[in-house]
Amino acid sequence: MKNLTKSEQHKPDLPDLIQKSLDGDASAFGLLMDSQKQYAYAVAFRLLHDEENSKDVVQEAFIRVWNNLEKYF
């Protein structure tokens, strides 16, 4: 059995966060967003080559995901 670090022990399970988000839990969605924001920003920055525009795109994307959760999951 793998020994988990403290951060891994407290790391929420993505499917669990998705389900809680679908159930309307905004704090779970916040955790889900936090777990994915660096990746989303990296993709946006790679495409846009602009820090502020990349941040705006990521923010807009997460707003759209929250407003349309049932379509994404």
Image (cartoon, helix red, strand yellow):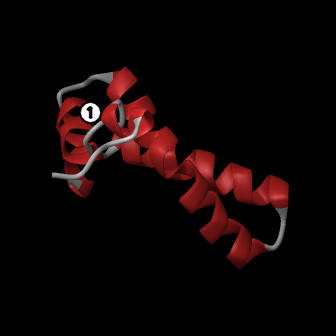
* Lateral position of residue 20 relative to residue 54, left or right: left
Quarter of the figure with residue 30: top left
Disc 1: CA contacts within 10 A as few (<14), some (14-19) or many (>=20): many
* Lateral position of residue 41 relative to residue 52, left or right: left
List x then y, in percent, for residue 40: 56, 60
Residue at the image point whose x is 31% and y is 46% from the top: 68
Q: Which residue is mark 1?
A: 21
Res. 63 visible in picture: no
**Total numbered circles:** 1
Q: Residue furthest bottom?
A: 47
List x then y, in percent, for residue 50: 84, 65
Residue at the image point whose x is 61% and y is 70% from the top: 43
List x then y, in percent, for residue 55: 72, 51
Badge 1 amino acid:
Ser
Res. 23 visible in picture: yes
Quarter of the figure with residue 7: top left
- Identify whether 62 is placed above or below 9: below
Residue at the image point whose x is 28% and y is 45% from the top: 3
